[in-house]
Image (cartoon, grey):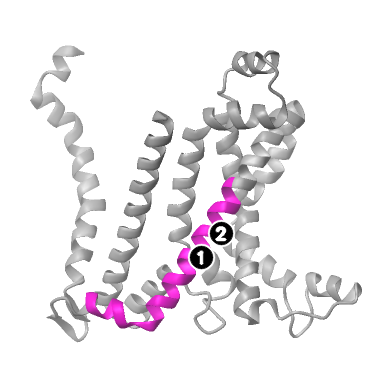
Amino acid sequence: MKSVLGDRRAIAILLGPALLVYTLVMLVPVVWSFGYTFVKGNPLEGFRFSGIDNFARLFVDPDIRDALFFTIKYAVVMTAGQVIIGYGLALLYIFVLRRSSVLIRTLVFFPVVVPTVAIALLFQKLFQSAPRDGVVNELLVNVGLGSVDWLGQADTAFLVIVVMDIWRSVGFYAVLLFAGLIDIPEDIIESARIDGARHWSLFRHIIVPLSLPILFSSIIFSINGTIKVFDSVLALTGGQPGNSTTPLTLYMYRTAFAFSDYGYGSTIALLLTIMCLLVTIVIFRSARRDITN
């Protein structure tokens, strides 16, 4: 094995095909898309060089501000919901349910494998207000409250999107965090208990510090996933009412493919990429500092 790893020709033969495929599938499209940020037009009209006009447009476009605000608000709320609820479920599996947690984990994880469009249709029916009320509005009317146009108002539409996406994805984070928590050595927990650590002190001083790596991994997964939210919003609200539930990804899709403005669409895609990179770098640096402390 050492002779193979020490031979540069052998390394090139073994890694060359994989690197070539990765370059063609990942790097070339990224560079190609970056090139589009400096042009205007489409294949039918032809492309013309526009310099930094697409970047300047980002600062004066009111729709990009609305989409950016929705994306950040959605990412923050969803990340908090996914990680906190997922962490709570993982703790429940280990310290309360124990052996019977397999059934609960299966039920909680089930929405993760259901197609997003099917879940969106289900929630449209649940929160429907016209032409007839859905289950949620019927319950509100039965307890003496009025019917709500859930998907027709910006705030309530955002609430429905968050509820749906947390229900759909929290099973993944619960299992991910469960896998991290179960690796904490049992003898450390028992030693802490013998030393008098109970409940909150055990959780704060033993469980949380030892599960920080998997918590930071979950946060990175969640933020990068929620910043790129697309299918659930498109299927549930289509970005409506108005543009109040339009994330950057949906705005980019409409700009590039519905209005054939490839240059500006690629600029929005670049903005998304930079956001994901910055968030990942910040979280990694924070994680490294906390673990060192």
Q: Which residues are magenta?
A: 55-83
Task: Give the numbered dot on residue 73.
Answer: 1
Residue 75 sits inside the magenta stretch: yes
Q: Quadrant of the C terminus?
A: top left
The image quarter containing residue 115 is bottom right
- Whether residue 84 is visible here, answered yes or no, is yes
The reply to whether dot 1 and dot 2 touch (C-beta < 8 Å) is yes
Neighbor class of circle 2 (other Cα within 10 Å; few <14, some 14-19, many 20+) is: some
Residue 221 sits above or below residue 209 on the image? below
Depth check: 144 or 40 in front? 144
Q: Which residue is mark 2?
A: 77
Q: Residue at x 29, y 76 (%)?
A: 58
- Residue at x 57% of width, y 23% of height: 184
The image shows residue 121 at horizontal and vertical percentages of: 65, 68
17 displayed left or right of 173 = left
Disc 1 crowd, CA 10 A, few/some/many (<14, 14-19, 20+): some
- Magenta stretch secondary structure, dominant: helix
Q: Position of residue 190 (x, y in %)?
A: 66, 15
Q: Position of residue 174 (x, y in %)?
A: 61, 41
**In the depicted structure, whether residue 239 falls above or below residue 285:** below
Q: What's under tag 1, amino acid-wise?
A: Lys
Residue type indicated by callout 2: Val
Q: Secondary structure at mark 1?
A: helix
Image quadrant where one finds the N terminus: top left
Q: Is residue 113 visible?
A: no
Q: Residue at x 43, y 74 (%)?
A: 67
Q: Nearer the viewer, residue 3 or 179?
A: 179
The Cα–Cα distance between marks 1 and 2, rounded to whole angstroms, is 6 Å
